Amino acid sequence: MTDRLLVDFFHAQQLGHAVEALQHCVGHAAALPGREVSVLLDATTPTELATWCPALSAVFPVDGPFLEADPAAAQRLAAVPRDWDWVVDDTRRHQPSRLDVFPGMRDHHAASDAHLPTRRGRSVVGAEAIWSIDGVHAAYA
């Protein structure tokens, strides 16, 4: 059976966040040749960029609010398959200050935790950072 990994990168729509997610996808694919790697992105980001990445098996655009609460977050994940060996998230999903400022992101990840059980584990991707007092700006180690 092929090892299946999903990078859950529901974050702000700026192009740089999509590029960041794709870098993680390429790294995970290279780390285990033959691994099926897919990405979940905010639908307002240029998701078509992911279709140009041969390391990816699929891209799942999720159309939900980022700045406002999303009571329909669970329904928005209906098109995302549930059978993954691994799910890796953007590290920012664990920063309480970001979850307070971006309730749509908070609701997405709560729904994602319920919708995406894994066979092997769930973790995070990204650089370790020391966050400033405002919880938004970082200095990367």
Image (tube, rainbow, N blue to C red):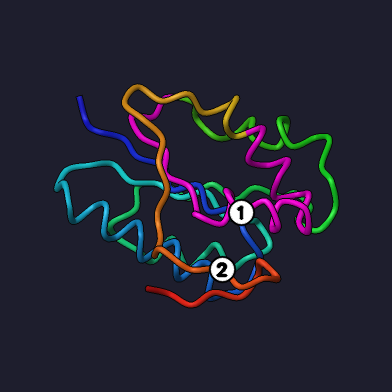
Q: Residue at x 14, y 48 (%)?
A: 33
Quadrant including the N terminus: top left
Residue 95: which numbered mark, if any? Answer: 1
- Residue 98 is one of the magenta-drawn residues: yes
Residue 59: which numbered mark, if any? Answer: none
Quadrant including the C terminus: bottom left
Q: Which residues are magenta?
A: 83-111
Q: From this view, report whether residue 135 is shown above or below residue 80.
A: below
Residue 16 location in percent, x, y? 53, 75
Q: Do tag 2 and tag 1 residues touch (Cβ < 8 Å)?
A: yes
Residue 36 location in percent, x, y? 28, 41
3 left or right of 41 in image = left
Return the residue nearer the eye: 49 or 106.
106
Q: Residue at x 59, y 51 (%)?
A: 61
Q: Residues within 10 Å of mark 1 (few under 14, many from 20)?
A: few
Q: From this view, report whether residue 18 is shown above or below residue 110.
A: below
Q: Earlier in the sequence, mark 2 or mark 1?
A: 1
Residue 89 location in percent, x, y? 48, 47
Mark 1 residue type: Gln
Q: CA distance from mark 2 to mark 1?
A: 9 Å
Mark 2 residue type: Trp
120 left or right of 22 in image = left
Q: From this view, report whether residue 80 is shown above or below residue 42.
A: above
Q: Secondary structure at mark 2?
A: strand
The rendered magenta stretch, by its main secondary structure, is classed as helix
- Residue 123 is one of the magenta-drawn residues: no
Q: Residues within 10 Å of mark 2 (few under 14, many from 20)?
A: few
Q: Secondary structure at mark 1?
A: loop
Q: Residue at x 50, y 47 (%)?
A: 8
Residue on which the image places disc 2: 131
Residue 38 location in percent, x, y? 40, 46
Return the residue nearer the eye: 131 or 59.
131
